[in-house]
Every structure is written in C-alpha cells, then in structure tokens.
Amino acid sequence: MSYFRKLLVTTVWLVPSLLLPQHVFAFGVSPAIIDLVGHSDTVLDSVFDVVNTSSEEQTYYFRVSNFVPDSTTGASSFSSSALYLEGFPNWITLSSQSLRVPSRSRASVPFSVAIPAGIPSESSYAAIIVSRSPADVASNSSGTSIEASTAVLLFLNTDSEGSERIEVVDIRPPQESSFLPYLSGTVDVQVQNQGEIYSLLEGEILLQDITGRTVRLYTLNEAKERLLPGATKTWSVSLGDSVPGFLKAAEREWEDFIIGPVKMNVRLHVQELEIAQKEMRLWIIPWHLGIMSAVGIGIILAAVSVLRRVLRSKRA
Amino acid sequence: MRSLVICLLILGLVALPQGLLAAMSSTNFQIQWDTVSTGGGDNASSATYQLRDTSGNQAVGDVSSTSYNIAAGYRQGVFDQILAFEVYAQSTSTVRAATSVIGTTVSASETGISEGDFVAVVENLGASQVVAVGQVASTGAGSIVVDRWTDNGTFPTIDGTNDFLYILSGSTIDFENFSVSAVKTAVVAMLVSTDMTLGYTITVFDDGDLRDGLESISDIADGTVSAGSSEYGGRSSDSSLVSSTFDTQDTAFTTSAQEVVTVTDPTFDDRTFVTLKAAIDSGQASGTYANTLSLVVSANY
C-alpha cells in the first residue's frame, strides 16, 4: 500500500472519531425513587422509564442491587459485589434485562415485586441499576475502564398500615427565651421514627394567637425527606428575620399585630392520616410598639392639653 | 370639636406605619418589581401545591438542520423526577499544549475538537495539577471557547509551562507508560441533571486494584499519590464531602462504594470531576494494568 493510500485510510478512520462528540454515557431514569407498599404473599407491579438523552439509539442494561441507606445524609451505598443478594432484591423480577431506546426518547421498564409470605412489618431497600454495559461483561482493555450507572431506588414498606410510630421529640423555640417582641428566628422541630417502617412525612406548624386567629402556617418537610426506621431528623422553619432598629421593629410588630401567648402546634401526617402532634407556647410582647404607642398617646395628650389652654386663653 | 381633633390625631398616627407598608411584601418576601414577559421557576410550592412554570415561552417547537437539533420551549424533553447522568473520561491521546486561558477562551490547537465536546485544561500536569472542565461552545484558529468552567475551587493558571488541554470523550483511561519519575493523571467529568428536591449523590467503587495478572498497583494509603511510589487513587472536585476523604486528599478506590460528589438541591447540568492518579516504583513489573471503576448516581432521599 502506497504511503498516500495508508495516509488516506488512516485519515478516514481517525477524523470522524476525533470530530464526533462521543457521549460515552448519557441517559436518565424517571422516577429516580419509587415508593412501594404491600402485604406479605402479594405481587406488586411497578414501572420506571429510561430516557435516552443522546443523539443515537442506545441499549441499556438492568440489574438489581442491594443498597444501604444512610438516614443522615440521604445517600445510598452500593457495592461491587452483586453475588449475594438477599431479601428484597431477590423478590424483584424485571420484564427484561436490556432494552434498546431510540435517540431522544424514553421507554418503560416494567417490573414486579413478589413479597413472600411471612414478611413482618418492615422497610426494605433495593435498587435497579441502569447502565450501558451488561454486568457480567468484564473489561479487558488496558487502563481504567469507566462504567457509569444510574440507580432507581426502591423503598418498600410491608404490612405498614397503622405501623407508623413517629414522635415529635422536641420543638426548639427561636431563642433561649420563649418571649419575643415579634415572630422571628428559626423553630427547630426534631422528629424521630421509632417504628420499623420508613415514613414519607408531611407536616405543618400552625401558630394561633390568644383569640384563635391563625397568624402563621408553615409546611414541614417540604423537601419530602424520608424518615427511616430509627432515624431522627430536625426540620427547621424560619419565622422571619430580625429587623434592625427600633422603628423597623415597631413597624414589624404593627404588621404582625400579635400580643400575648401564641400556640405553636406541630402536626405530622402521612397522606391524610395524622400520626403525631405536639404543642408549645410562645409569648409575644411587642414592646417597641408599646413604647411608641405610649409616646404617641403622651404627645396627643400634651397636644390636647396645649390646645385646651390656648382655647381657654382666647376665650378669656 | 375637641374629640374630633383627638380622633384625627390618633387616626393619623395609626395610619402612619401603613404608608411604610405600601410595597408588595410580607414577612417572608418582597417583590421589588416584576414583569409578565419573563419569570417562573421549577420549585414554587406550598402545603397544597407544587408549581413549575414559566412566562414568555415563545417560539416553542422542534427545529433541525443537517448539523443541529433544537427542542425549544419550557422543559422540552425533560420529564418529571428525572435523574440524568453523563460521564466523559479523558482521552489521553488528545493532549495538546495550552498557552493561556482568558475568560472562557483557551489558546490551544482546535484540531479534532467540535462544538459540544467536553475538554479539560490542566495546569502543571502531574501530582499537583489544577483542572477546569468545560463544554466547547465554539472553536477558532488556535482557540477554543467553552460555555463555562468548572473547577475544584481553584482555577488553573495557564501560562504554557507544563499546561495542557484534553478532550474528554473516552470510556477508558489510558495512563500510557507509567514512570517512576512522574504521577500519571486523568480526568473523568460527570454531569447530572435532576429535579429531585434533595439532590443527588455519586458513589464510586472499583473491581479491585489496578492489576495485570498477579501484579498490581496498590491502593493509595498515605493521602498523596507520589512519584516513585506504587500507588493509585483519586481526588474529587467536590470540596464538601461528609462521608469520604476524596475532597481533601488522594483517596483509594475500593470495592465498597464511597461518595465522590453530593449535591443537596435540584440541579440542571451540574458538573463535577474526579482526577485519577497513578504512580509506580522502580520494582513495579512492566505489564498492561487495568481495572474497572464504577460511578453510580442516585437520588437523595
């Protein structure tokens, strides 16, 4: 082969590979977390989607894995060893082990979970790992092969009805003292899961003044954190920032127009079922506004007094 | 008459603070100005609703030519609760000298680089290298413009002395020839988009040491991969890890998953990278060393 021909062949092979963007791994899953609830000796059906975000048709491979949840960080811990799957991962049957997905489109991956008989009320965790290469294919290239995977996390509660044991451990007021001139600072609500199943809690903090008027309503756990068995979480709610200066504080107290005891009621529920509640009391003493009012009344009285004297002197 | 004057005075005082409250505000927000032609957001919510919206969504639809595709419009092609992951590994053979970086423009050969590629600029290639990655927005003669840079908190100072640019496009890191006098490095960039409210975590694990038969390069144990020592590890661009040391020192990849990136908010096109480092001592047998590194992204809960 002539030098020119060699050069041409090499160029034809090399140039496209250099010019084309090679998106090694580009895909998504939806949803990324699936919550399942079931009884012993039943089969649950569910589905997730694989989204091909690349410009080429791709084949995706699926495998089931254990994962260890971290109740503090909310992160998952996986392992390279998928040989000894126990419990929940073994109950999962995928409709297929791989799937071809056209460019920039999505495809559904159904799966079922056969919960064996005799499973107690508990939470179990598993993941379906989606990758571009089958799990049993080992790389034989030199160097470090990079394999990217996306995990669909599965959270399963078995026989969970009425099993939630959630406790509002503590409600910490914004300051050391429960006496405030106006609502400000942060309320910390410490919640503990004392049961065997995880909870996807929602909740509110309702603040009512002495007349029963609702002065504030805050949502707890807006980010939808899962509270795992044995875990304790602290959710914070800001009642508002402190304002600088006497006049601004008085203005804020006027806006709020709260005086006396304020009942702070924390209520937690799973869907519509209330499962925990706790109350505490704050005292609002709007002293900036009080001083301003006293000064204002003093000025008014002084002005009236002067006016009356002027009027009297004119009459005389 | 006297009572009327008193009442008017009191009413005036009472009304005074209301004048100060004329702006659109509450204790929780203040809207200085707004417009109906732009706006919206992905995370509006209250106790009873969640809203993802936008305003001014014009020229919506798909447009394409022989060289591009555009899916224009709000959240086109984006699906709820999605967790999307892209990984780009350094293609070591694409190395070329970089002489300067001004803003988002790198002075380096543009040969073989296309719009949309990911590139890494490396200051002082080796054990203490400083890296930034970006996606190519355009190229010119001897220059490459990226959309934005992502670094580990320190942006590289590129002056042409031991500074290089790589294309990130492979699936295998080739360390080329190991040397007792230098630490071999490679960058793996990761992109994540998710609307999960608690963000995401990327964990990493390997299938064993970098090895060739019975010979292996040991996992790093002393926190720094050093030339002349046989060791292998990595360092993350995420500087705020809680449960691993990838953010503060060179750390060993093990068969148990370790956190390399964690983000606690919904994010779009979030970019991070891991720098792989390997070195050998003079007694290391020559061979073809290999292993597999797995990166797994999962939603936080």
Image (spheres, rainbow, N blue to C red):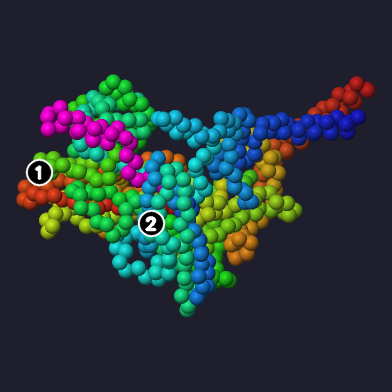
**Left or right: where does residue A185 sit relative to residue B85?**
right
State whether residue A143 is above or below residue A13.
below
Give x and y (percent) for residue A127: 41, 60
Task: Return the residue found at the far right.
Answer: A315
State whether residue B8 is above or below residue B206.
above
**Circle 1 residue:** B180
The three-letter amino acid code for the residue at tag 1 is: Val
The magenta segment is: A1-28
**Left or right: where does residue B300 sit relative to residue B260?**
right
Dominant secondary structure of the residues highlighted in magenta in the image: helix
Give x and y (percent) for residue B250: 24, 47
Residue at image coords 36%, 26%: B138
State whether residue B43 is above or below residue B219.
above
Residue A69 visible in the snapshot: no
- The front one of A70 and A119 is A119
- The front one of A99 and A68 is A99
How crowded is the residue under tag 2: few (<14 C-alpha within 10 Å), some, or many (20+)? some
Give x and y (percent) for residue B225: 18, 46
**Circle 2 residue:** A98
Residue at image coords 28%, 34%: A16
